[in-house]
């Protein structure tokens, strides 16, 4: 299943009906949480999202309306800017903000968070979802947008499979090996499938218009873009 659960869109200040930022992307078995502002855990509860669904937290920048409150359970990788600008260190991952948030209060730590500072444009992570990439945006502090790029694949054609009598484990074997010896004849993957372009999701926040915006939006199936500047 693939869906975007919008947990909040109110940026700096929540309203009676909108929470601060927070977006969960469900991508098959993976859960990517973007810019989880204050109150995200409660929004997740209201939306029926379990903390265990979150594998990865992606923070575009360390303004206060998109900071993760990480006192939950489970484990996740946290990507965000290391945050230096012109040699001047700014708060970011491993530079104080995240540890400061996590350890601002005393609690029994059960969440295993793995910090992955984003220092340059390019791939941040790869997985069954494809590639997660970062591009620099133009905001007051170091800011990265993200996009998830699924590689192109092939869609099996059930009618063709049925016509040739291919079923069960043979389908998987054909997908893995590209050819199948079946009922005395050779069947190729191309015969029973068609090209399926990979899907793309892009996330762009708080930026002036810049090259990174265009690069992230390029051929996106779903683009989340917001700025209250
Ligand atoms: Zn901002």
Image (tube, rainbow, N blue to C red):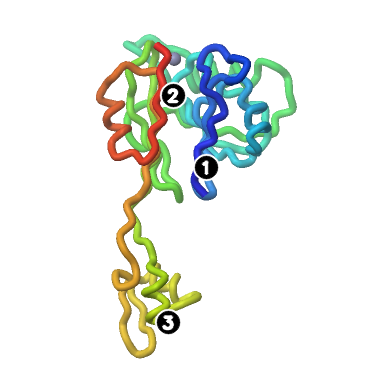
Q: Which residue is mark 2?
A: 60
Residue at figure coordinates x 70%, y 33% from the top left: 110
Report the front residue among 131 and 223: 223
In-front residue for pair 205/120: 205
Residue, disc 3: 165
Answer with mark 1 or mark 2, whichever residue precedes in sequence. 1
Label 1 crowd (10 A; few <14 / some 14-19 / many >=20):
some
Residue at horizontal 37 percent and vertical 62 percent from the top: 155
Residue 222 pos. (x, y %): 39, 37
Relative to 153, does residue 88 appear above or below in the rendering? Answer: above
- Taking 54 as reference, is 143 left or right? left
* Tag in front: 1 or 2: 1
At x 33%, y 75%, the residue is 179
Mark 1 lies on a secondary structure that is strand
Q: Which residue is mark 1?
A: 26
Residue at (32, 30) in percent of width and height: 121
Q: Residue 198 location in percent, x, y?
A: 35, 50
Residue 215, relative to residue 106: is it above or below?
A: below
Residue 135 lies, in percent from the top left, at 33, 29
The image quarter containing residue 220 is: top left
Q: Secondary structure at mark 2?
A: loop
């Amino acid at each position: 299943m693939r869906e975007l659960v919008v947990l909040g869109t109110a940026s700096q200040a929540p309203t009676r009906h909108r929470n601060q930022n927070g977006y969960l992307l469900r991508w098959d078995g993976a859960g990517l949480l973007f810019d989880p502002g204050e109150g995200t855990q409660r929004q997740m509860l209201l939306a029926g999202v379990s903390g265990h669904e979150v594998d990865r937290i992606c923070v575009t920048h360390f303004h206060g309306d998109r900071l993760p409150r990480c006192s939950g359970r489970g484990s996740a990788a946290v990507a965000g800017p290391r945050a230096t600008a012109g040699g001047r260190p700014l708060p970011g991952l491993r530079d104080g903000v995240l540890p400061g948030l996590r350890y601002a209060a005393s609690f029994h730590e059960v969440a295993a968070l793995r910090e992955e500072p984003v220092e340059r444009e390019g791939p941040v992570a790869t997985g069954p979802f494809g590639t997660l990439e970062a591009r620099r945006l133009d905001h007051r502090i170091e800011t990265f947008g993200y996009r998830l790029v699924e590689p192109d694949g092939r869609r099996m054609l059930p009618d063709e499979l049925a016509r040739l009598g291919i079923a069960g484990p043979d389908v998987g074997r054909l997908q893995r090996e590209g050819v199948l010896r079946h009922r005395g004849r050779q069947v190729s993957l191309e015969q029973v499938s068609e090209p399926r372009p990979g899907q793309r999701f892009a996330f762009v926040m708080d930026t002036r218009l810049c090259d990174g915006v265009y690069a992230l939006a390029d051929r996106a199936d779903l683009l989340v873009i917001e700025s209250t500047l």
